[in-house]
Image (spheres, helix red, strand yellow):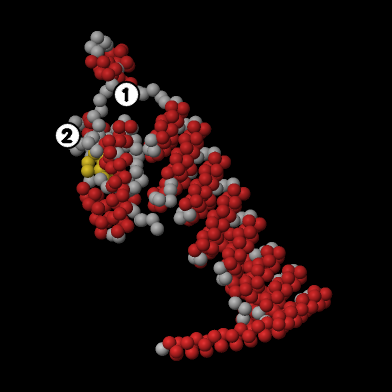
Amino acid sequence: MSLEIPRLFVCPITLDVMTDPVRTNCIEEKPKDSLIKRILSIFFNNFFLKTSQVEQINGHYFEKLALAKLLRQNNLTCPLCGRKITKVTPDKKLSDMIAKKFTNLSDEHKKHFEEAKKEVLNSYKEMIDQVVVPPNICSNRENRLNTNNSVNHRAFHLHNSLYRAFHPPRETDREKYDKVTNHISTRNLVLAERDADLIIFSYFRNKSYNEIVDKYLDLCSDAEIRASFQKLEKAIDVCKKISDPQIKNDIYYKIVQKAILLNRHLALAKRAASLITDRNKKNKTFEKIANKYISNYLENKNESFIKNAIIIANSNILDFSIQQRVLFKSVNAYSNNLKLKKAFELTKSLSLVTLKDFNKKHIAKCYVDKNFNNKNFEKALIAANQIFDRSTKDSAYNIIATKATSKIAFIKSFKTISKVSTFPKRFFLYFKITILIFSYSFLKILLSPFKLSHFALNFLVAKFRALLTRIRS
């Protein structure tokens, strides 16, 4: 089972619990005063009215070393809101809350916290001795332009680096896509998603989202169950932004396949499958999930798995033939695990007569194979009596009669044969059973002398052994 971690404790960059949290100062200022009040304050030079107050919105929380590396790649802008970051403050209160939660709970929480700490130190070891916010130093060319005093006329201010900083050249969609691929290669998927949102041309935007989802799926593994769950959730959220329905359906299908492969996120696979708009692909996807639930039931014998498969067949699958196929496999799964009563009840939900008859014949066979007694014999007859097809019913009676003969229950065997529909089949079965009875009796008569001699020999050997033990003692 995955650990439950509050969203406040999770870093948006590492997608894991923060071991050294810091708070940024990406603050937005919004004036509280009205427009008229601000104009009056300007005209009266603040004699009658106080200066306008501002409402401050707090910054965001990140892992310290991860933020230090990201700010060097992202020109000192916040990956969540895009505003400039000039100061970072360690949050001791939040750090104490995280440490208290992960040390006072179970050993699993403590172990996970230590592993997250080691992973951060290994991944960002080059940032340990660096400051979080690097000094914003201009390039050499900008320094030359700023210190050049030969051009002081106002008309030349357009060529100033400060002007270019406020009016940067517009990036093409191709350049934005290249930035996205660069972020994906360095595993900065939050930045990649943010830059993909800025792309205008739908081809590059959908391609960027597709590659981001592929990277999220590649990072999923069986070793990190909770992290894989979060990555699959992020992949679904990114996939929702794709505008092309065909690409979107293909990616949702990939997410379902990955969740089935991990085998612990089938609920997330159901969520992704429900977002597919193509009806045929949606039905096939839900069939795959239901089959995985059935196979898990056969391995673990947990009732919840088979119940989920039945719910998917009745609620999510809209194609009739696929629905009947899943229910047929569910009945077989119950029969293989000897849950014959539930299998018999589930056959009522099947609409195809051939599938019903086949399952009832299989249930009758399982009853007599399970433990041949009067109770199971009667249940097998009840299952065989409800078969609609005459040839299938006669085949089920043949199986029950043969099993009764092998268990020396000849009266039960003849009782079963009397229910066969046609006289030639009954005559053939009577003849077959009679030959089996005579051959069994003949074999018993032939073997009786050998049995008597074997019994006598064992008796004499036992007496001789007893006599030897007395002489020795």
Q: Residues within 10 Å of mark 1 (few under 14, many from 20)?
A: few
Q: In front: 96, or 228?
A: 228
**Residue 48 placement (x, y as % from top left):** 18, 36
Which label number is shown at residue 47? 2
Residue that numbered label 1 is attached to:
165
Query: Could you tell me which secondary element the residue under label 2 belongs to?
Result: loop
**Residue 350 placement (x, y as % from top left):** 65, 65
**Residue 251 placement (x, y as % from top left):** 52, 43
Q: Residue at x 44, y 40 (%)?
A: 215
Q: Quadrant of the N terminus?
A: bottom left
Q: Residue at x 56, y 53 (%)?
A: 288
Q: Is residue 407 left or right of residue 207?
A: right
Q: Residue at x 80, y 75 (%)?
A: 428
Q: Quick one: label 1 or label 2, which is nearer the N terminus?
A: 2
Q: Is residue 445 left or right of residue 247?
A: right
Q: Quadrant of the C terminus?
A: bottom left
